[in-house]
Amino acid sequence: MARKKIVAGNWKMNMTPSQAVELVNTLKPLVASDEVEVVYCVPAVDIVPVVEAVKGSNVVVGAENMYFEEKGAYTGEISAAMLVDAGVKYVIIGHSERRDYFKEDDVLLNKKVKKAFEAGLVPILCCGESLEQRETGVTLDWIRLQIKSDLQGVSAAQVASMVIAYEPIWAIGTGKTATTEQAQEVCKAIRETIAEIYDEATADAVRIQYGGSVNAENAAELFAQPDIDGGLVGGASLKADFGKIVNYK
Ligand code: 13P
């Protein structure tokens, strides 16, 4: 089955609302593509203006985080229903920066994944190992554990529709990209894990991105790998280079 490539920008904590609209307008002609699905995952305050600014283009909007509770006394949090009503389609869950700086664990992330589906959002679930884990040789075991924990109670049909992003922590924002072989090896292991928990059809359908210092120079080789269905892009998503990554061929 042919999976549609998906290239998502993760803007992280960058771009004020007015800068966001300016960036969307600058990138508009550069990211046009019939072949690749393009997503901008933007800070919460940018969602409303960015949803407006991407209208009429091929870009859809994602959030960078959400909370799992329906609503209520959770000061500072944003619900799935709020995102849906604002026009968001995707939501990044479990980025390593949230796991690390905000102490989000797999129990919490599993709740977020389930809530996202319940609300009609598509999760982009992130996983990835530290440099220390890679050097001690536990990368694949660690990734399998993250995937299994975060997807508990999630149906095969839901997994088939979602996106999993493999982001080695040591490659994020460091300019140090995983080699194509390293990235393919882990993305393949993720697909095998999905086949093991669910079935071949689900593993065939789920889209798996690589993230970590993706740029205009390395995107083509990474995205050509059999188990890499696109990228989750940080720094380079804030520049004209993002157009080159989307149109990597
Ligand atoms: P960089 O592309 O800046 O390395 O960030 C990757 C990332 O964390 C995307 O979610």
Image (tube, grey):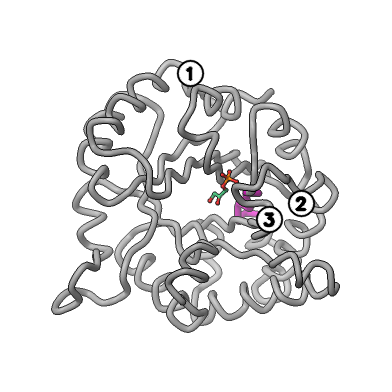
Give the residue at mark 3: 204
Specify the amino acid type for callout 1: Leu
Residue matched to label 2: 183
State the SS at label 3: helix
Q: Residues within 10 Å of mark 3 (few under 14, many from 20)?
A: some
Indicate the position of residue 247 as horizontal and vertical percent values: 60, 23
User: Disc 2 or 1, which lies upstream in sequence?
Assistant: 1
Residue 199 in picture, x, y percent from top left = 68, 69
Identified at 68% across, 52% down, the residue is 171
Residue identifier under label 1? 30
As drawn, 236 above or below 169 = above
Task: Identify the residue shown where x is 65% and y is 64%.
Answer: 128
Tag 3: residue type? Asp
Residue 206 lies within the magenta run: yes
Residue lying at the far left in this picture: please name it. 72
60 versus 86 height, above or below = above
Magenta-span inclusion, residue 81: no
Q: Residue at point 44% right, 57% down? A: 92
Stretch of the chain drawn in magenta: 204-211
Res. 135 mark: none
* Secondary structure type for disc 2: helix
Where's residue 100, x and y in %? 52, 70
**Dot 2 surroundings within 10 Å: few (below 14), some, or many (20 or more)?**
many
Mark 3 or mark 2: which is in front? 2
Prevailing secondary structure class for the magenta stretch in the rendered image: strand
Quadrant in the picture for the C terminus: top right
Q: Locate residue 115: give its quadrant.
A: bottom left
Q: Nearer the viewer, residue 246 or 100?
A: 100
Above or below — where is 243 with respect to 10? above
Q: Earlier in the sequence, mark 1 or mark 3?
A: 1
Q: In terms of depth relative to the viewer, which is nearer, 118 or 165? A: 165
Residue type at the position of mark 2? Ala
